[in-house]
């Protein structure tokens, strides 16, 4: 990875996440995602746009998108993050709810050599413990068709692809309910007012009730 600071890597990763849907990463959304003031975001975006080669394209009042050079750094950081999460779970015995914070720190610290050794030890894995794809060594990443479970209507069947790793409490709740990547489900019922989803989960007899916040944290592929 080129010589960039941890905070540059975090910015590029956050812009990558916010622009996956084809939108610009607006300054205020970026500030919220990174937990910093909008004014410092603006300063950093100007700096990233004036790097050689530029890492972002910044438009005042609209926000930023990544250049190819910026995207490569974002994907390289994501590759390390996801490899480290899997390493912590598989080799060091961490729970899947304990690895995100550790990986946030370690992704900036390990060498290319250690990254390659971890990948080899794990058998060049394709997915992290939360079901997110790990960018390949050439930094390609398969396109995902996953949508939030919140978008699944009653009667629909599907499979859990990935879950958000942002909140450890959400991850603990998901494992208690058996809602893990790879698990199949049917949406039995949806209620309008309180926005609950009742799921029948593969391998379990009882229906599981999901509130709206949890339904936004679960990403699924639906049968067509
Ligand atoms: Zn993570």
Image (cartoon, rainbow, N blue to C red):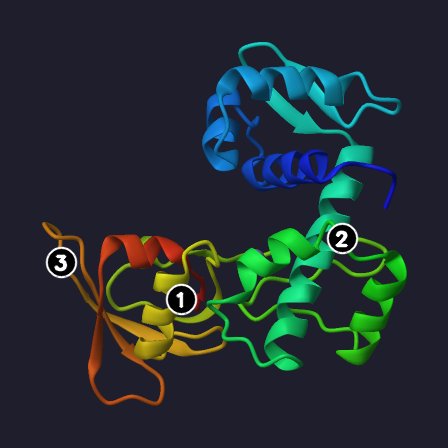
Image x and y of residue 13, in percent: 65, 41
Q: In this view, does 16 lie above or below 45?
A: below
- Mark 3 within 8 Å of ligand 1, using the beta carbon: no
- Residue beneath disc 1: 171
Who's the residue at 68% across and 73% down the image?
87
Where's ligand 1: which quadrant?
A: bottom right
Image x and y of residue 113, in percent: 90, 63
Kindly report which numbered mark, 1 or 3, lies closer to the viewer in this rendering. 1
- Label 2: element kind: loop
- Residue beneath disc 2: 109
Locate residue 194 relative to residue 74 in the image: left or right: left
> Decide: marks 1, 2 in contact (CB < 8 A)?
no
On the question of residue 53 being in view, the answer is yes
The local crowd at label 1, few if under 14, some if 14 to 19, many if 20 or more residues have their Cα within 10 Å, is many
> Decide: marks 2, 3 in contact (CB < 8 A)?
no
**Which sits earlier in the primary sequence, circle 1 or circle 3?**
1
Residue nearest the observer in this picture, 67 or 3: 3
**Which sits earlier in the primary sequence, circle 2 or circle 3?**
2
Who's the residue at 59% across and 76% down the image?
89
Residue nearest the observer in this picture, 127 or 170: 170
Residue 7 falls in image quadrant? top right
């Amino acid at each position: 990875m080129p010589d960039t600071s941890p905070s540059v890597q975090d910015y590029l990763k956050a812009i990558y996440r916010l622009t996956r849907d084809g939108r610009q990463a607006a300054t205020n959304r970026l500030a919220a995602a990174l937990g910093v003031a909008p004014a410092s975001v603006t300063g950093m975006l100007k700096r990233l746009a004036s790097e050689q080669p530029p890492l972002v394209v910044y438009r005042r009042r609209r926000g930023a998108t990544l250049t190819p050079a910026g995207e490569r750094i974002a994907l390289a950081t994501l590759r390390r993050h996801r490899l480290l999460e899997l390493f912590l779970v598989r080799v060091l015995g961490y729970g899947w709810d304990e690895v995100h914070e550790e990986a946030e720190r370690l992704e900036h610290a390990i060498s290319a050599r250690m990254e390659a050794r971890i990948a080899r030890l794990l058998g060049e894995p394709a997915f992290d413990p939360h079901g997110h794809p790990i960018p390949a060594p050439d930094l390609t990443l398969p396109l995902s068709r996953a949508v939030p479970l919140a978008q699944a209507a009653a009667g629909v069947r599907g499979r859990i692809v990935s879950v958000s790793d942002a909140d450890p409490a959400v991850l603990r709740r998901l494992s208690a309910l058996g809602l893990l990547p790879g698990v199949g489900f049917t949406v039995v019922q949806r209620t309008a007012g309180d926005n609950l989803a009742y799921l029948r989960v593969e391998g379990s007899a009882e229906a599981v009730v999901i509130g709206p916040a949890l339904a936004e944290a679960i990403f699924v592929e639906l049968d067509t």
